[in-house]
Image (cartoon, rainbow, N blue to C red):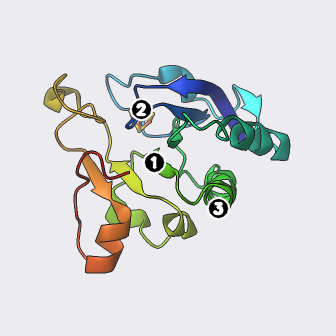
C-alpha cells in the first residue's frame, strides 16, 4: 500500500496541532474532492514499517495532541491493514493522544473493522458537492458526520463528537 504525504504540524484536520497522514488511493471519486491527487493507488510513496515509525516519532512532541488519518481512503481494503497497524501502534504508544480518521464509507458499513478499537473520532461519508458548506467544522458537506466512536460503541448508537473532548 502507499501514502501521499505526512504533515508534521497540521491545524486543519481535527482539534489542536496534529500530525496527519494522507493515504494513497480512493475509489469513491467524489465530485469536488479536495484531494484528487490521492485517488490513484499507484501514486505516492510506499507505506512501510519505517513510515509508521516516522509518523509515531513525529507524534512524540508534547505540543502534538493527536494523529489524523485521511485520504485517499484509509478504510479501503487495500489500505486498511496499514492504517489499522498504524492506529494500533499509535494508541499503544500514546494512549492519551487522540486518533481521528476520515472516510468515504459510512460508519455502519465498516463498524466491525478492528481499527475502531483504536479510533476516537471518525468523519464519515462521501463529499457531496451540492451539500458543501464552508462553515462546517471538520467536514466538507452536511451529509458527513463527525462521530464520537468511543461513546457510540458504548451506547450502541451514533453519538456525534462535541468539541474539546479529544
Ligand atoms: S472519499 Fe474523500 S478522498 Fe475519496 S474522492 Fe471522496 S472526498 Fe476525495
The residues tagged by marks 1 and 2 sit, at their Cα atoms, a distance apart of 9 Å
Q: Residue at x 39, y 53 (%)?
A: 121
Query: In this figure, which residue is indicated by the disc labeled 3?
Result: 88
Q: Secondary structure at mark 2?
A: loop
Q: Nearer the viewer, residue 138 or 25?
A: 138
Total numbered badges shown on the rendered structure: 3
Does residue 132 lie above or below 153 as drawn?
above
Residue 13, numbered circle: 2
| Mark toward the start of the polypeptide (3 vs 2) | 2
Label 2 crowd bin: few (<14), some (14–19), many (20+), radius 10 Å: many
> Residue 117's x, y, as percent?
52, 69
- Cα gap from disc 3 to disc 2, whole angstroms: 20 Å
The yes-or-no answer for disc 3 within 8 Å of ligand 1 is no
Q: Quadrant of ligand 1?
A: top left
Left/right placement of residue 91 relative to residue 137 reads right
Return the x and y of residue 41 as percentages of the image width and height.
Answer: 65, 35
Q: Quadrant of the N terminus?
A: top right
The answer to whether mark 3 and mark 2 are in CB contact below 8 A is: no
Could you say which is closer to the camera, residue 156 or residue 59?
A: 59
Q: Are marks 1 and 2 in contact (CB under 8 Å)?
A: yes
Q: Secondary structure at mark 3?
A: helix
Q: Report whether 104 appears left or right of 99.
A: left
**Which residue does the numbered mark 1 point to in the structure image?**
100
Residue shown at 32%/22% (left/top)? 32
- At numbered mark 1, what does the secondary structure look like: helix, strand or loop? strand
Amino acid at each position: 500500500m502507499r501514502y501521499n504525504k505526512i504533515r508534521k504540524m497540521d491545524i486543519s484536520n481535527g482539534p489542536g496541532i496534529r500530525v496527519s497522514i494522507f493515504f494513497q488511493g480512493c475509489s469513491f471519486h467524489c465530485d469536488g474532492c479536495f484531494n484528487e491527487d490521492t485517488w490513484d493507488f499507484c501514486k505516492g510513496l510506499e507505506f512501510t514499517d519505517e513510515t509508521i515509525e516516522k509518523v509515531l516519532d513525529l507524534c512524540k512532541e508534547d505540543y502534538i495532541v493527536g494523529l489524523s488519518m485521511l485520504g485517499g481512503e484509509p478504510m479501503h481494503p487495500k489500505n486498511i491493514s496499514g492504517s489499522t497497524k498504524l492506529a494500533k501502534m499509535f494508541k499503544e504508544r500514546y494512549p492519551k493522544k487522540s486518533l481521528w480518521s476520515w472516510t468515504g464509507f459510512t460508519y455502519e458499513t465498516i463498524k466491525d473493522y478492528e481499527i475502531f478499537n483504536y479510533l476516537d473520532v471518525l468523519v464519515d461519508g462521501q463529499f457531496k458537492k451540492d451539500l458543501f458548506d464552508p462553515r462546517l467544522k471538520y467536514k466538507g458537506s452536511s451529509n458527513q458526520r463527525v462521530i464520537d466512536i468511543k461513546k457510540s460503541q458504548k451506547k450502541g448508537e451514533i453519538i456525534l463528537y462535541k468539541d474539546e473532548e479529544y
